[in-house]
Amino acid sequence: MNKIVMTSLDEDIFHEKLDSGLNVYIYKKEGFIKKGAYFITKYGSAINDFKPIGEDKIVSFPKGIAHFLEHKLFESEDNEKVFDKFRKYGANVNAYTDHFITNYYFSTNDNFYECLDELITFVRTPYFTDQNVEKEKGIINQEINMTNDDIERFIFEEMFSLALVENPNKYKTIGDKQNVSKITKEDLYRCYKTFYHPSNMFLVIYGDVDIDETINFLKKKEKENTFLKGEEIIRKEFKEPSMVMKEYKKIIRNVITFKIGICYKFIVGKKDKLKKFKMNLFIRLLLDLKFGNGVPFEKDLIKDGITKNGVSWTYSYFDDVILLFFEADVINKDEFIKRVHERLIDNNFDKNLFELNRKALLTQVVRTFDSPISVGNMIYNDVIKYGKVINDKYEIYKNYSYDEFLSYFDKLNFDNKSILYVTNKEE
């Protein structure tokens, strides 16, 4: 077992790779009642073109199949609902699929090992039939209708498709009705066999658990299955151009307040783990310095009658692409677009505000370890983004300089952006 020492934090995370290839991470926190686990496969909605295990050619699978597969794993041959199995132990269980992963997780105060056993068992026991697959299509189609009615989610997902040209992150996690209708039982088993091998998965456990007892439990559990040696998964590669797919799109929706979304696109090249971590750090600081609570930008938008409730912003960083998203209930869309752009390209930064935000990140790292659940989230996010737990992030934040921040900013090109405008027929 390896001990990952979190530099300058007096905290440890334990890691062991089981014979099956499954990586296990455990964060023990004494005195906390809540315990839980995340069982994650590195398979999300952006992975549709790959060579299934045991086959010779890359196959294109229907969009949304990773999310569909997540739904189907909650169905068992004994007809007892997975949610009911956890409920009898006083536990909560759920799952989600995003562009990069599918995450199955539970939390509980008691009966931890019973719940851990149930989690591993249902994820490793696929049960797909022609009948239950066809039934699920109707359920997924209803979910598609619901997500289309959620205007904020619609805008966010639509901006991916407007900005991206080749990268498969442009597609919605849930898919669309046309693609969902094509999914078959055989497709699901091929995807499951490829991506749900332990070597493509990892398990994160948090709470006041006995580390040795937990590892021994997992090793015993592994013996219930026979796993072939994990194979490298071959995926289709995509080269994303710097320009956006579409610069402007207007759609008509039944909205009272008009809405706008802006997505800036940057191609930053492939980076090693440290450079990728620092790029994430740079983007977080950039958005905080430009639009955070320490500056009057949002209040000015409201005061000047440009937006109704300010502006929301976030970002996504995957492969060699960074997307910055801005969304608002807009009163004057042209002025909003202008102000966001002028704010972004302005190379005048407040060094004192930079230092305050950098120190806030240091505090945030420390406080993460006050919550075992937060540490669990940190672990799996690090593993997905960087392939390992970043154990020296405190030192990286501490030593990150203003000059280094400026050097990243100077390399950005703000010429490529997509705009989505949502209005109604009365305009």
Image: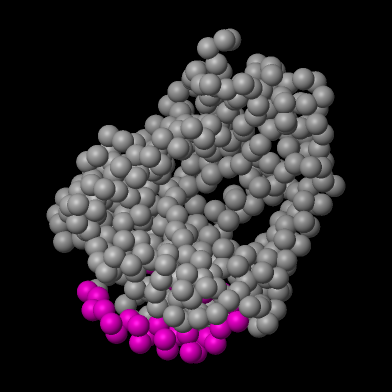
The residue lying at 36 percent from left, 50 percent from top is: 67
Classify residue 231 by image quadrant.
bottom left
Q: Residue 235: x and y, percent?
A: 29, 51
Whether residue 254 is situated above or below residue 105 in the rendered picture: above
The colour scheme is one colour
User: Residue 175, can we see it?
Assistant: no
Span of residues in magenta: 200-228
Classify residue 255 by image quadrant.
top right
Q: Residue furthest top?
A: 427
Q: Residue 38: x and y, percent?
A: 48, 67
Residue sitting nearer the eye, 369 or 90: 90
User: Residue 295, can we see it?
Assistant: yes
Residue sitting nearer the eye, 63 or 270: 63
Residue sitting nearer the eye, 183 or 115: 115
Quadrant of the drawing holding the C terminus: top right
Left or right: residue 136 versus residue 269 is left
Q: Residue furthest right?
A: 352
The residue lying at 53 percent from left, 86 percent from top is: 211
Asked if the magenta segment contains residue 204, the reply would be yes
Asked if the magenta segment contains residue 45, the reply would be no
Whether residue 223 is situated above or below residue 310 in the rendered picture: below
Left or right: residue 397 versus residue 228 is right
Q: Residue 299: x and y, percent?
A: 80, 31
Classify residue 121 by image quadrant.
bottom left
Whether residue 188 is situated above or below residue 348 in the rendered picture: below
The residue lying at 58 percent from left, 63 percent from top is: 378
Q: Residue 79: x and y, percent?
A: 29, 65
Whether residue 307 is situated above or below residue 164 in the rendered picture: above
The residue lying at 82 percent from left, 34 percent from top is: 296
